Image: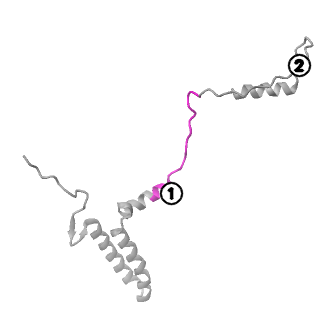
Amino acid sequence: MMFSVPQFIDVEDKIAGPLTWRQLLWMIGMGATLLVFFNIFDTALFFIMAVPTVLIFVALAFYRPNGFPLTTFIFYAVLFIFRPKVSVWERPLRQAPVAKAPVEKKEVADTGAKHIDQEKLTELARILDKG
């Protein structure tokens, strides 16, 4: 049997002419905002406020950066700005053996008694700290 496989399933349905539901709702929102601006402001201020409002609503309805709707893009940008950026480094459980540098031996006169001076003590502490 032959079955038809749906094509273009990621394309939204067109509702009013070439507009999808989201685009249509953004355009209705723009119209409502412009109507409120027209009733509140005088003519000159209305046109000054209308231009950026129209640009913002048209961008929200039609602009798709990287294939995402602009609303999704703005949502992820806000999450990126307000989410803490913390990098956590965890020490590995096992460390690879580290090649040790050869230690120079100093000639010490054997007097029979073991005497450790401050310089030798700091050298031993440094060797123990390295592991």
Location of residue 42 in the rendering, given as x and y in whole percent from the top left corner: 42, 87
Q: Nearer the viewer, residue 67 or 23?
A: 67
User: Which residue is the site of mark 1?
Assistant: 81
Identify the residue under disc 2. Answer: 108
Dominant SS of magenta comes to loop
Give residue 30's mark. none
Spatial CA span between label 1 and label 2: 64 Å
Estimate how packed mark 2 is, as few (under 14), some (14 to 19) or many (20 or more) residues with alpha carbons within 10 Å. few
Q: Can you give x and y, in whole percent of width and height, for residue 48 in the image?
A: 44, 83
Please state if 125 lies on the left or on the right of 61 as rendered: right
Quarter of the image holding residue 129? top right
Q: Secondary structure at mark 2?
A: loop
Q: Amino acid at mark 2?
A: Val
Q: Is residue 92 magenta?
A: yes
Q: Position of residue 88 (x, y in %)?
A: 55, 41
Write the start and end of the magenta stretch as one range. Answer: 77-95
Identify the secondary structure beneath mark 1: helix
> Looking at the image, do the residues carrying marks 1 and 2 touch, with CB atoms under 8 Å apart?
no
Q: Where residue 127 appears, x then y in whole percent?
A: 74, 26
Residue at screen point 84% across, 25% down: 120
